[in-house]
Amino acid sequence: MIKINKFLAASAITLSLAACDIAPYSSMAVYADQTAKVICDERYWVAARSGPGTDYELEHKLSNGKDITILEETKGTDGKTWYKAKYNLAANNEECVSYIRSDFVSVAGDSTDGQTQADGTAATDDAAATQSADGDNAIAVYAANGAYATGSITGKNVYVRNAAGTSGTTKVVSLDWGHTVDIIGETRVNGVVWYNVTGTLNGKSFTGWTISTYLKVTYNNSTNNSDYAAALKNAGFPDSYIANLTALHNKYPNWTFEAVNTGLDWNTAVANESINGLNLVSKSADASKKSTASGAYNWNTNTWTEYEPGWVSASSEYIAYLMDPRNFLDDTNIFQFQSLAYSSNEALSGVQSIIKGTFMEGTKKYSNNGESINYANTFLDVAKNSGVSAYHLASRVKQEQGINGTSPLISGTYSGYAGYYNFFNFNATGSTKAQIYQNGLKYAKNQGWNTRAKSISGGAVKIGANYINKGQNTLYFEKFNVVNSSSLYFHQYMANVTAALTEGQSVAKGYSDKNQAFTFKIPVYNNMPSSAVGFNKAGDTNNYLQSLSISGISLTPAFNGATTNYSVVVPNSISSVTVSAKAVSGNSNVSGTGSYSLAVGSNTIKINCKSQSGDTRTYTITVSRQAAPADNGNNNNNGNNNSNTNTDVNISSSSYKIGTYITGVSPDTSASTFLKNISVSASGSVKLLTGGGSENTGKVGTGNKVAVYDASGNLKKTYEVVIYGDVNGDGSINALDMIKLNRHILGKGTLSGSYLQAADANRKNDGGNALDMIIMNRHILGKTKISQN
């Protein structure tokens, strides 16, 4: 992949090479700079190419919602309508002009019936796949009677049509996320699978065709597979994997499935992959896919931190869904688990199938250097020497160089670098096409890649050395490093959390014949849920208030959206109050505002903020109305009957040190034990609160607050808790704390306040540093304990 850094998903400069000489286009319709947007599912991207057709080179990957300006319309080499459009790159505001297929563009004023192109060819590479060997419209029905599989819809407003494809068909029904259908057949249109489905909607039956892109498939088993199922179990697959793998075996008997036991606890792996900035989704993604963790999201402003321009942290729920292999055991999505390591089962015919119809088919004789090369044989020979799958090498070059292979990086004729080749586009980065070509070819020259064969061989060795031969030998393992223990979780090739899934789909579409001896290495974790982790595209999750007030009266403490408990004291003369509140998100619903009559004593008012996703956050205001002063003719108290109102309240402890912070608390101490060791003066009381202000009844952690109240319930003081070594505030000392401190040291995250104090494990008052990392590691290994006193 051409990239400016290892974050493949970044919308930074990833210009990917335009052909210098291209065939004349067909007649064009000129637009008056029509504004439009790119449309696709958030999991995918849309290709912007150097010319109108899938045989032209990929210049950019545009995400959903990208603003463009249409300049011209033309008929492409693939028979489709394409737009010549201009747009800006976020990284340097550079204006670019490329071609985008029209069915991935929403023109201002057009209607898509609320559908984000869910019935188009969604798009890892806008329908660039080859046709099936048995013809584009050959229908495969695998069950003589009834369905051979079931499918679950994974989008919104996904159309079922009266025939496969979008051209000349009509819409039967529109289905939303999670709707289940039976699959009775399938076919290919423009290289993309369409399923013949049946089902019911609102009590009425329907039959039609829907695109595979938005359907999660579960195969039915109709034969006795007890021996094969037993073999899978003996190979290390849990029961929850076996049904779909057995069904795939029935369909593709040459496929081999290998269980890769990561040895990792499932929840621990998900937690580590959920560290802010490690896995990203598009800023325009559904809110449920975006992380709301501290640092990744600001609840008070409803904004996300951008770790790359246009890209934010993925939610742990979405990460868990994508990490669970059981969600993707079908004949398309499984290719993210395809082994990228060479296998003796790989056949020359399989390589030839992958490169059929491309510039690499057959034996080529080049005039510029007299080189003769048979690409299929070269890929197979190189695979044996490099340890990298010939299938993967062929697919990767096909993806990098396109169908026609017209890039200057492999022409051997680029001025100043004649005779040098870079088939895998190593180091081909820059802000202009000229910079990309020159940087890539300079790299090739330094490597001595002065023939096409040397470039393929040398590139394969580098691919193998960096990832594949280190155990990260599938697209999944390159994305989620759960196997390379030397840099677990961090040595990851892509930041886009869906990269393995979408690139695997692209690879799957590139095989015109899947009946080859593929090997799939599928991860297994300890303590996995009994069934596949689901994901609910629930919408906006923000249930914070932007403001909360009582007319003419100040809240204690001052309002903060993260704080849910407040108190006020009013004189007896105030018999009612009016409460106002406003939500941060316009998608939220606020209830409980208005006027309240007050009784003498304590009055509880609750304001609820319900998010679009259905989560409710409750804000509680305790209003204390004072009693009327006694009228006995001899009252010198001036109405101050509560003798504790102005009494100072203090706390003390024989177990803990109370100063700027409360310290001396052992890891894994329960809130109840902690509070038993706190004494309060003057009839006061204390509560343990989380950093967000809600009451903590679980485990004490760094950043928790001890709130001190007087006898009337007025908040008087707060103290923050510090547990040395507990950097993330969960009350324990473990690898997650080391990861957080490591990011602070590397400048990828910032610790402050009580969390920075907790990082000072060596108690030198020198902040968090590498010495503290060592002490924390020794504590985790049980060699020494971090002193809390």
Image (cartoon, rainbow, N blue to C red):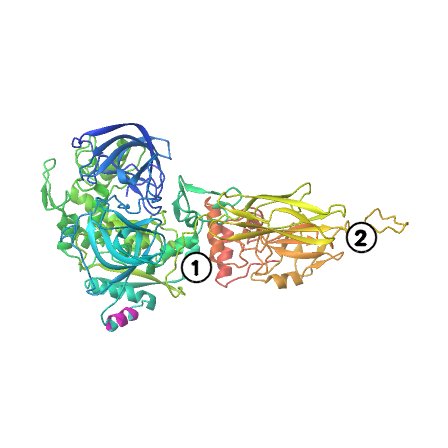
Q: At label 2, which amino acid type do we have?
A: Ser
Is residue 258 one of those drawn in magenta? no
Instruction: Return the x and y of residue 34 as percentages of the image width and height.
Output: 32, 30
Spatial distance from mark 1 to mark 2, Cα to Cα? 53 Å
Query: What's the residue at 62%, 63% (across, down)?
Result: 672
Mark 1 / mark 2, whichever is N-terminal: 1
Instruction: Return the x and y of residue 185 as percentages of the image width and height.
Output: 21, 58
Is residue 231 one of those drawn in magenta? yes
Q: Which image quarter holds the N terminus?
A: top left
Between 386 and 233, the one lying in front of the other is: 233
Callout 1 crowding tier (Cα within 10 Å): few <14, some 14–19, many ≥20: some
Q: Tell me the element at label 1.
A: helix
Q: Say if 4 sits above or below 637 in the image.
A: above
Q: Say if 195 sits above or below 243 in the image.
A: above
Q: Which image quarter holds the C terminus?
A: bottom right
**For residue 490, side relative to residue 578 (left or right):** left
Instruction: Return the x and y of residue 56 as percentages of the image width and height.
Output: 21, 38
Q: Tell me the element at label 2.
A: loop
Residue placed under numbered mark 2 in the picture: 643
- Image disc number at residue 268: 1
Tell me where the magenta segment starts and ends, as one range: 227-233
The answer, for residue 465, to whether it is visible in the render is no
Q: At label 1, which amino acid type do we have?
A: Thr
**For residue 403, side relative to residue 287 (left or right):** left
**For residue 582, side relative to residue 260 (left or right):** right
Between 84 and 746, the one lying in front of the other is: 84
